[in-house]
Image: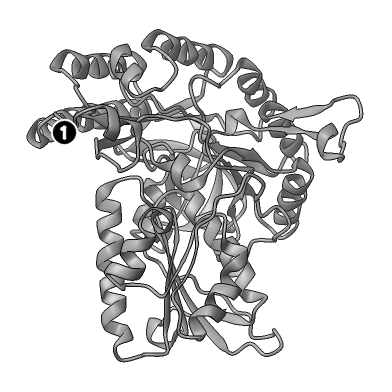
């Protein structure tokens, strides 16, 4: 997976948040679940699947961990410090369990697959481990723990997409929702652990995707984000699956799926995450340009601005290829916002190669970026093939240069929007004041304005009057 791409807002607002649902109407509901999620959008989407599976077993959820019969933590393994945060949390759970011996503690997701033996046997921090493809087995694993055993299922699947499970929506505002369209990844980027923790790439039946999006719209949601490790490689061979939506076509690609979702309703906004530069084709860009409700925002991770580093990363494209894709985006969708991921200090990165990243940033001028120091991950090609030889102080210095430049670029992009009028989907109160509402424009910029009489989930027109490097500030256009 890209370096926790597109997840910064989620991490700020929801990392470690207990998921609070109510299933008191279920017959026999009596057990309580406390669930925390960390990492990328896919993990939060997976947590909705887990909540649905356990709801059918009679579990209600609670925000009070002391009340829980079952504590699950959905984890990320993309960077070392993400794993350390989870370990610290599990240690807290272990202390809590000493006063609640009947409590079952489990770990889910990418970190679960990678560290199953350590967590179960050596550190004894958890009672059960379930990998990303094993969530259907959770009731059996819980029952196994009830017999005094430690339970584990981290088997990866070439088929599992959870397409038949209706996720429990955890966004109480009912405005935006995640819809997973594919799982796994076939890209073997040398720095990335995802192919080993989430398995091979497989796409989900488009019929089930369209039905889920329609159900969300009918329930009052007005925005969906289509999720996949690499959405551009989405492909469903309908003939081989025996479920033909359009008899004139034998397959559906990502551009066609985007169009199909957009046609459900002009009032349903569509976003997606994440694209891979080597796979993004013009038909996707043309689909965005064709439909007003497909947002003018693309997250296109570059990771490095130097072709030699990209080669060591096994990214499958050059600096020139990436810049050609940027040119295509700007030509086909002139008002499109572009964000990226950047890794500082990858194996063997020279000062010249670092400066190539800086120069690429200056050439593109990204709206946003998610920026990280390189963190070596076990089992990856980089760990086996390269030495993590850039000193940490050099990584930190280069990262700080990148952050300072991106802050400047983000402010520049926002200043250029002052005076413009945008359609905003109202998400709810702003962080600082109940008297102000916030929402995003098509370009994914956060906009804050006086609430007046507007309703959450509605579309309003806002004129931008000022900005910070991170936020647009505006006034309602009557």
Relative to 445, residue 356 above or below? above
Q: Nearer the viewer, residue 34 or 162?
A: 162
Q: Position of residue 43 (x, y in %)?
A: 48, 54
Q: Position of residue 65 (x, y in %)?
A: 39, 81
**Picture quarter with the N terminus:** top left
Residue 16 lies left or right of residue 154; in this view the side is left
Label 1 sits on residue = 400
Residue 472 lies left or right of residue 24; in this view the side is left
Looking at the image, can residue 161 be seen? yes
Q: Residue at x 38, y 53 (%)?
A: 114
Q: Residue at x 67, y 90 (%)?
A: 28
Q: Nearer the viewer, residue 430 or 342?
A: 342
Q: Position of residue 141 (x, y in %)?
A: 54, 73
Relative to 44, residue 256 above or below? above
Q: Nearer the viewer, residue 161 or 267?
A: 161
Q: Residue at x 63, y 44 (%)?
A: 158
């Amino acid at each position: 997976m890209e370096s926790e791409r597109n997840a910064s807002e989620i991490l700020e607002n929801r990392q470690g948040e207990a998921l609070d649902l109510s299933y008191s109407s279920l017959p026999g509901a009596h057990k309580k679940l406390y669930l925390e999620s960390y990492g990328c959008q896919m993990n939060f989407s997976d947590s909705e699947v887990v909540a649905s599976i356990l709801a059918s077993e009679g579990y209600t959820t609670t925000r009070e961990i002391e009340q829980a019969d079952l504590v699950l933590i959905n984890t990320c393994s993309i960077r070392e410090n993400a794993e350390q945060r989870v370990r610290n949390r599990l240690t807290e759970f272990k202390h809590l369990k000493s006063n609640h011996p009947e409590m079952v503690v489990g770990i889910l997701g990418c970190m679960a697959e990678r560290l199953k033996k350590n967590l179960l046997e050596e550190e004894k921090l958890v009672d059960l481990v379930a990998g990303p493809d094993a969530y259907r087995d959770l009731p059996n694993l819980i029952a196994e723990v009830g017999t005094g055993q430690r339970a584990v299922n981290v088997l990866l699947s070439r088929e599992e997409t959870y397409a038949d499970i209706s996720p429990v929506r955890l966004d109480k505002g009912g405005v935006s929702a995640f819809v997973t369209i594919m799982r796994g990844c076939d890209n073997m980027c040398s720095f990335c652990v995802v192919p080993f923790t989430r398995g091979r790439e497989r796409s989900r039946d488009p019929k089930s995707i369209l039905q889920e999006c329609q159900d969300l719209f009918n329930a009052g949601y007005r925005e969906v984000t289509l999720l996949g490790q690499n959405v551009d490689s989405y492909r469903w061979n309908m003939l081989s699956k025996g479920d033909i939506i359009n008899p004139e076509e034998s397959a559906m690609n990502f551009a066609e799926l985007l169009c199909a979702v957009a046609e459900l309703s002009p009032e349903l906004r569509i976003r997606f995450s994440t694209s891979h530069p080597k796979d993004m084709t013009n038909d996707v860009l043309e689909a965005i340009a064709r439909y007003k409700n497909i947002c003018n925002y693309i997250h296109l991770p570059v990771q490095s601005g130097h072709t030699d580093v990209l080669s060591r990363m096994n990214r499958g494209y050059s600096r020139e290829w990436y810049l050609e894709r940027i040119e295509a985006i700007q030509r086909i969708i002139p008002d499109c916002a572009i964000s990226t991921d950047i890794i500082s200090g990858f194996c063997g990165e020279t000062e010249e190669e670092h400066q190539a990243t800086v120069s690429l940033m200056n050439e593109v001028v990204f709206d946003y970026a998610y920026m990280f120091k390189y963190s070596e991950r076990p089992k990856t090609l980089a760990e086996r093939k390269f030495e993590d030889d850039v000193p940490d102080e050099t990584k930190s210095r280069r990262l700080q240069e990148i952050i300072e430049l991106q802050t400047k670029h983000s402010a520049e992009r926002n200043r250029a929007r002052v005076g413009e009028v945008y359609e905003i989907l109202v998400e709810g109160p702003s962080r600082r004041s109940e008297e102000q509402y916030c929402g995003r424009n098509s370009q994914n910029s956060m906009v804050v304005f006086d609430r007046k009489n507007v309703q959450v989930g509605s579309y309003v027109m806002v004129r931008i009057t000022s900005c910070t490097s991170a936020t647009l500030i505006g006034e309602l256009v009557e």
